[in-house]
Amino acid sequence: MVLKSIFRIIIMEEIEFILESTNEQMTNTIKHLEIAFSKIRAGKANPQMLDNVNIDYYGVQTPLSQASNINTPDARTISVQPWDKSMLEIMEKAIIDANLGFNPMNNGETIIINVPPLTEERRVQLVRQAKSESENAKVSIRSSRKDANDELKKLNGISEDILKDSENKVQNLTDSFTSKIDSFFSLKEEEILTI
């Protein structure tokens, strides 16, 4: 009797571990989606638009954000103020080379980037890109669900009822995170299409 209850406790701890690790994987998927969405510009200036810009900072490839202050004085402008003014031209060239569709202007002190308004065609492309990122996130969530269910089935001595109950918990997690992805996409789509 004692052995049976100890065995049951061990099984329940293993199930709890599987559920927690699945939750963590799915949470990481959402974080990744948020980062991907932040890189899809919606017409408003955002310092994160320059996240992929690297410069040769005294022989070391360095993100632009680590060699300057980047901020948005208004909804259509990004300002880049280098810590070392001798890097202005290198930074300006790096922004142009990043092929972001920006035309930076160097005034000798800072680099000013006017973010052009999006065309209707470009908005549709960005919505498609956001949709694709959402679908990739959903595939990752479903993959986490499959891994969790496979792990549950590998547990020795787990009863049918406990297995079904655990699989239902995994499905509830999956549904919850899929719903989050859908609402993130709806918000991003609205943000992109709002003129």
Image (cartoon, rainbow, N blue to C red):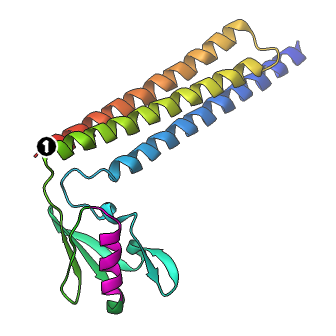
- Magenta stretch encompasses residue 107: no
Residue 85, located in which quarter of the rendered image? Answer: bottom left
Near-viewer residue (177 or 84): 84
Disc 1 marks which residue?
A: 120
Magenta region, main secondary structure: helix
The picture places residue 100, in percent across and down from the top left corner, at 29, 61
Q: Which residues are magenta?
A: 87-100
For the point 32% across and 77% down, the residue is: 93
Which residue is drawn at the image coordinates 73% and 28% (left, top)? 14
Q: Position of residue 134 (x, y in %)?
A: 39, 35
User: In this picture, is 139 found above or below 167?
Assistant: below
Give the residue furthest to the bottom.
86
User: Is any part of residue 90 visible from this angle?
Assistant: yes
Q: Position of residue 5 (x, y in %)?
A: 82, 17
| Res. 184 in view | no
Quarter location, residue 149: top right
User: Which of these two is toward me, 162 or 180?
Assistant: 180
x 45%, y 22%: residue: 175
